[in-house]
């Protein structure tokens, strides 16, 4: 556990703007005395019990009133940061909150850096690194499921799993150490069986985590979905229908190019960024060519492409051009062929559709009536999550950083098992296990470089 910080930090903890309340938060050894210096309440803050809320007024240096407020006093060590924390709940206006923050800074606090409250919680041992990351994941959650997974991570569920695997590996390392230290005793059959069992069980636990991780990452980061097709097949209608279906349109932002529109929505419980693109027609027209290039770029950065065709008409050359390009070597993303306008009757020859390769599927929908949209959603989810068997593989891992560490750890454990099977010397096995331990320690923060920690907290906002 790191030593407590000498400096007291302060920041506005609520969004700047008009609101019911605005909160200025302080953490550090001087937090209580700093606020007490300009706070007029029935009691001095210096004497109130921990975790109490005190009503009073805030006065500026000239003794003029700034606001009436409720001040929360929480004394170390049972606080979020592990230090004394004071939260000034004032009225939620830009000027008043800024005035209170200025008073706090004049009285000796320094402005907090991004994520510094949570970083202190980590440094003071209140949270491990995975839990600290969960704080930002809660703030940024884009779907109820993403929020749930993050909240469980904050509770320490992921950390517990990781520690349990570390325990097994530490046990195995100790076991091997005995073999190295007392070579004359020989490795009895039972001993090496036990070791193998421990390693296999650790390997299994890591595999389970990796299985759930692929889906977990989708819930956290969402997916990019490109809607492609020639003009008039109903791309915009489909986009709107998908957004309307979920009633969760968040933003409508111009895409990176003039030809693409991006919107955010929830597809089921998965956050998606939908990109409506222009056509993909082969052309000699230079202007059109630029559009096509941009479309291809937009598609290439997607996780899944919905290729829309008009089911009420025969396929045109443009439809085929889109499908063929998507199936060419130039594109590797999975596709779903969406046969739209099925309310008008199906005229398009489905058999004539270029046979989708890999995991591509064909779904009939009507953007107009809503028919088939549910099915489309299911198929999209299925394609994205692949054939992952989720049973018994809880979704605990969502971050790329964690997934990478777990994969390194798993590879190292597998290598250790292999070395053991090949009858390698114990120290070879031991090296693999150390590598695995190191990788797992990076998740919870036991063995993580300072730059990585700094990078993680830089993602936060000020006041968190
Ligand atoms: P886009 O150019 O591919 O974006 O196509 P739009 O979404 O603008 O749709 C072109 C036309 O087809 C519009 O008149 C829509 O009302 C119509 N349309 C779109 N989807 C359907 C559908 O499922 N059924 C029917 N009957 N018409 C549709």
Image: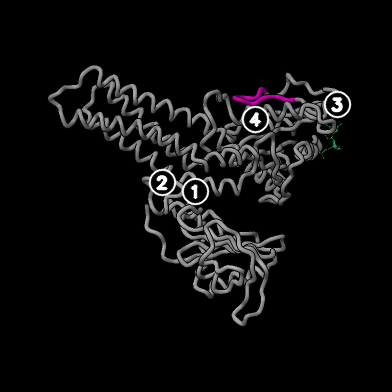
Q: Provide the secondary structure element on which disc 2 rests.
A: loop
Residue 282 visible in this rendered orientation of the protein: no
Measured as percent of width and height from the top left, residue 54 is found at 61, 63
Q: Quickly name the residue at label 3.
A: 343
Displayed-image quarter of ligand 1: top right
Nearest to viewer (mark 2 / mark 4): 2
Q: Which mark is residue 445?
A: 2
Which residue is drawn at the image coordinates 62% and 75% (left, top)?
Answer: 59
Which residue is drawn at the image coordinates 73% and 40% (left, top)?
Answer: 279
Q: In 3D space, how far apart are the residues under numbered discs 1 and 3 (Cα atoms)?
A: 50 Å
**Can you tell which quarter of the image residue 410 is in?**
top left
Which residue is the extreme one toward the right? 344
Image: magenta residue range: 355-363
Mark 2 and 1 residues: CB-CB less than 8 Å, in contact?
Answer: yes
Mark 1 and 3 residues: CB-CB less than 8 Å, in contact?
Answer: no
Q: What is the magenta segment's predominant secondary structure? A: loop
Residue closest to the eye, 211 or 359 = 211
């Amino acid at each position: 556990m790191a030593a407590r910080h000498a400096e007291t930090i302060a920041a506005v903890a609520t969004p700047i703007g008009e609101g019911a309340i605005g909160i200025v938060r302080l953490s550090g050894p001087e937090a209580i005395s700093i606020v007490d210096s300009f706070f007029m309440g029935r009691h001095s803050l210096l004497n109130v019990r921990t975790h109490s809320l005190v009503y009073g007024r805030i006065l500026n240096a000239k003794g003029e009133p700034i606001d009436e407020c409720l001040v929360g006093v929480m004394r170390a060590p049972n606080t979020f940061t592990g230090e004394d924390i004071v939260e000034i709940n004032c009225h939620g206006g830009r000027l008043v909150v800024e005035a209170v923050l200025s008073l706090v800074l004049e009285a000796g606090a320094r402005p907090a850096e991004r994520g510094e409250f949570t970083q202190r919680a980590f440094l003071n041992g209140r949270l491990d690194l995975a839990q600290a990351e969960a704080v930002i994941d809660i703030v940024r959650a884009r779907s109820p499921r993403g929020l749930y997974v993050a909240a469980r991570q904050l509770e320490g569920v992921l950390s517990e799993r990781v520690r349990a695997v570390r325990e097994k590996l530490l046990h195995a390392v100790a076991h091997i150490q005995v073999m190295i230290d007392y070579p004359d005793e020989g490795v009895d059959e039972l001993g090496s069986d036990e070791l193998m069992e421990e390693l296999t069980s650790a390997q299994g636990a890591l595999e389970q985590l990796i299985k759930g991780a692929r889906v977990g990452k989708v819930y956290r980061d969402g997916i990019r979905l490109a809607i492609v097709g020639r003009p008039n097949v109903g791309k915009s209608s489909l986009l709107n229908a998908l957004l309307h279906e979920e009633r969760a349109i968040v933003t409508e932002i111009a895409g990176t190019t003039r030809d693409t529109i991006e919107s955010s929505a929830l597809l089921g419980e998965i956050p998606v960024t939908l990109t409506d693109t222009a056509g993909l027609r082969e052309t000699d027209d230079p202007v059109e060519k630029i559009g096509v290039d941009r479309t291809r770029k937009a598609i290439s950065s997607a996780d899944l492409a919905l290729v829309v065709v008009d089911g009420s008409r025969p396929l045109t050359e443009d439809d085929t051009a889109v499908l063929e390009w998507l199936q060419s070597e130039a594109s590797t993303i999975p596709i779903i062929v969406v046969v739209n306008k099925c309310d008008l009757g199906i005229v398009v020859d489905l058999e004539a559709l270029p046979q989708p390769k890999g995991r591509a599927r064909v779904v009939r929908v009507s953007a107009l009536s809503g028919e088939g949209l549910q099915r489309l959603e299911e198929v999209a989810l299925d394609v994205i999550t692949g054939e992952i068997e989720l049973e018994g593989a809880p979704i605990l891992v969502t971050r790329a950083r964690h997934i990478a560490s777990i994969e390194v750890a798993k590879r190292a454990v597998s290598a250790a098992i292999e070395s053991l099977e090949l009858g390698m010397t114990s120290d070879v096995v031991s090296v693999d296990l150390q590598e695995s331990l190191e990788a797992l320690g990076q998740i919870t923060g036991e063995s993580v470089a300072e730059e990585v920690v700094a990078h993680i907290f830089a993602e936060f906002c000020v006041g968190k």
